[in-house]
Image: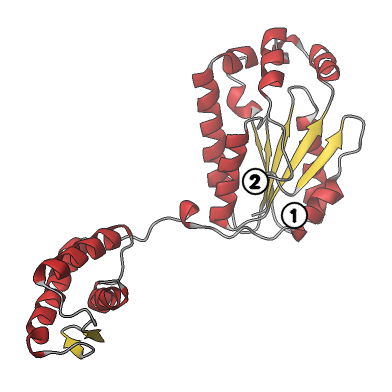
Amino acid sequence: MPFVVISGFPASGKTTRTKELLEFMKKEWPKNVVVISEHDFVKDQDKDYTYSSSQVEKDVRGALKGEVIRKISKDDIVILDGLNYIKGFRYELFCISKNCRTPQVTVHCIINPEQAWKWNESRPESQRYSRAVFDGLVMRYEEPDSRNRWDSPLVTVQADDLTPAEAVLQALRAAPAPKPNMSTQNPMLAPTDFLFELDRRTQDVVKAIVSAQESAMEGDQLPVTGTSERYTVPSTGRLTLAQLSRARRQFVSYLKTHPADPASIPTLFVQYLNNTDR
């Protein structure tokens, strides 16, 4: 389940680092090690065509992201080999990690642009970037920053360095799995009749309170149908039907986006009334 994101300029040695990481991890990691390569999604069309069209490039990123979602599993290491040069895309990958509760490490391949260009020129012609596309990607590149939670922990490797495979593995083992938050979790699915039950049960609570408070004094605790929770008559006096109806509408609006067990609705509504300034 640990996730490694490789990032760097074009022709910065990312694929070489990925292969060396793969060989090392296969020996050290007890489960599978999976590589997802950007090259596999660009191979049917040349690099210049892909990175000269924002829509085609966006489609490639979408395919990579989908593949990451499919390949992340409970125990496997997933290595994503690609430019991954857009900060927002790396954040999206981080959200996938958060949702899966898996540690993520970013490996930044650092190289001088001119040296990267020389490496690019030494490749077979079919694998090269044109100068215009190369310069455009370098200009648009957003470097990983360890201060960003989606880039941390960050392992950097210079062009002449050995691949820091051991450091990457240690970072994966030491990094805590990020805790998912509301933005990365699937919302709770409500029963198909939830809205009907929400409306009916809150209406019943309002009717019960209107009826019970006819003979009640401030501070009295009134029983309410459907719950053991008691409604406390406020010190400001009994609430009118209009006031209770307004509070009910506010409560219903909230619960529409935060579904709960229908059986708990009367209890939650009474608690809401007791704790709302009235």
Q: Is residue 210 above or below residue 134?
A: below
Q: Amino acid at mark 2?
A: Trp
Q: Which residue is most to the front?
A: 236
Give me the residue at 58% from left, 19% from top: 44
Q: Residues within 10 Å of mark 1 (few under 14, many from 20)?
A: many
Q: Which mark is residue 150?
A: 2
Q: Nearer the viewer, mark 1 or mark 2?
A: 2
Q: Check if mark 1's residue and mark 2's residue have beta carbons within 8 Å.
A: no
Q: Which mark is residue 172?
A: 1
Q: Earlier in the sequence, mark 1 or mark 2?
A: 2
In the image: residue 140, left or right of residue 265:
right
Q: Secondary structure at mark 2?
A: loop
Give me the residue at 91% from left, 38% from top: 162
Q: Amino acid at mark 1?
A: Leu
| Image color mode | secondary structure
Residue 95 vs residue 225, the one in the foreground: 225
Q: Considering the image in quadrants, where does the C terminus appear?
A: bottom left
Give me the residue at 62% from left, 35% from top: 87
In the picture, residue 175 is in which quadrant? bottom right
What distance separates the C-alpha of mark 1 from that of mark 2? 14 Å
Residue 136 vs residue 52, the one in the foreground: 136
In the picture, residue 228 is in which quadrant? bottom left
Q: Which mark is residue 14?
A: none
Q: Considering the image in quadrants, where does the N terminus appear?
A: bottom right
Across and down, in percent, residue 99 comes to 53, 54
In the image: residue 276, left or right of residue 98:
left
Q: Residues within 10 Å of mark 2 (few under 14, many from 20)?
A: many
In the picture, residue 15 is in which quadrant? top right
